[in-house]
Image (cartoon, rainbow, N blue to C red):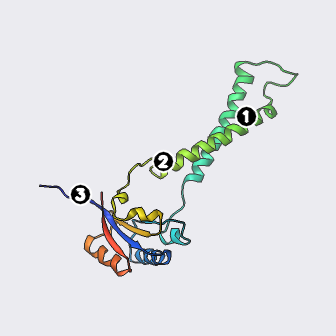
C-alpha cells in the first residue's frame, strides 16, 4: 500500500501580475495569512498584499557593527595600554586617534558579516529543496507565470474550500503541493 505524501499547500497559477496581485489581496481579505507569491520579476504592491512585516536584519546589522566597533577599540586599548605598553613618539598609551582606522574597519566587517549571516538565518537558508518545487509547472515561475501558494498550516486552510476559493479567483490552474 502506497502512502500518499502530506500536502504543503495549494498553488494557483496566474497569467499576469495584475491577476496575481488581485488574487493575493482578495485572499488576504478572506483571512488567509500563510501564503507566498512567486513571480519572474518584482511586482509592485505584492509585498503589501502579502502583508510582509518589517525584518530584524537592520537590528542584527546594528548589533554586529557595535560588537565590531567596541571589540576593535578595546582590543587595541588592551594591547597598547595593558598587555604591551610601549611609549611611541611620546604619545599616551591610550592614543585613541590611532585606533580609529582599525575600529572603523572592524565595525564595517562585523556589520557586513552579521547582515549576511542574519539574512541567511532569518530566511531559513540554505534550503536546497522547498516543497513548492514539487508543484507542476512551477518551473514557469522564473519565466512568465505567476503563482500564489496558500500553505496547509494556515488556520483557515481546508483543502476543498481553499481549492474552490483559488479557482474562483480566475487561476489558470490550481494544484496540490506535496510536502
Q: Which mark is residue 5?
A: 3
- The quadrant in which the N terminus is found is bottom left
The Cα atoms of the two marked residues, 1 and 3, are separated by 55 Å
Q: Which mark is residue 102?
A: 1
The one nearer the camera, 157 or 90, is: 157
User: Of marks 3 and 2, which one's residue comes earlier in the chain?
Assistant: 3
Marks 2 and 1: in contact by CB < 8 Å? no
Q: Is residue 171 left or right of residue 112?
A: left
User: Of marks 1 and 3, which one's residue comes earlier in the chain?
Assistant: 3
Dot 1: element: helix
Q: In the rendered view, would you say 25 is above or below 117? A: below
Dot 2: element: helix
The one nearer the camera, 13 or 92, is: 13
Report the residue at 74% width, 23% height from top.
81
Marks 3 and 1: in contact by CB < 8 Å? no
Around disc 2, counting alpha carbons within 10 Å, would you say few (fewer than 14), some (14 to 19), or many (20 or more)?
few
Report the residue at 39% width, 63% height from top.
138
Q: Is residue 54 visible?
A: yes
Q: Quadrant of residue 44?
A: bottom right
Q: Quick one: which residue is furthest to the right in this view?
A: 90
User: Of marks 1 and 2, which one's residue comes earlier in the chain?
Assistant: 1
The one nearer the camera, 68 or 121, is: 121
Q: Which mark is residue 122?
A: none
Percent x, y of residue 127? 42, 49
Amino acid at each position: 500500500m502506497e502512502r500518499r505524501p502530506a500536502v504543503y499547500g495549494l498553488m494557483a497559477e496566474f497569467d499576469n501580475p495584475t491577476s496575481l496581485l488581485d488574487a493575493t489581496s482578495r485572499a488576504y481579505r478572506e483571512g488567509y495569512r500563510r501564503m507566498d507569491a512567486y513571480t519572474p520579476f518584482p511586482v509592485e504592491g505584492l509585498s503589501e498584499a502579502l502583508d510582509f512585516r518589517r525584518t530584524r536584519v537592520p537590528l542584527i546589522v546594528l548589533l554586529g557593527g557595535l560588537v565590531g566597533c567596541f571589540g576593535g577599540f578595546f582590543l587595541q586599548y588592551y594591547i597598547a595600554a595593558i598587555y604591551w605598553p610601549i611609549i611611541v613618539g611620546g604619545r599616551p598609551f591610550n592614543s585613541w586617534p590611532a585606533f580609529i582606522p582599525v575600529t572603523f574597519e572592524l565595525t564595517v566587517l562585523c556589520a557586513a558579516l552579521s547582515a549576511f549571516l542574519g539574512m541567511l538565518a532569518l530566511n531559513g537558508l540554505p534550503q536546497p529543496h522547498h516543497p513548492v518545487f514539487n508543484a507542476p509547472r512551477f518551473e514557469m515561475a522564473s519565466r512568465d507565470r505567476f503563482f500564489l501558494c496558500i500553505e496547509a498550516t494556515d488556520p483557515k486552510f481546508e483543502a476543498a474550500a481553499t481549492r474552490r476559493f483559488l479557482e474562483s479567483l480566475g487561476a489558470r490552474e490550481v494544484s496540490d503541493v506535496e510536502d
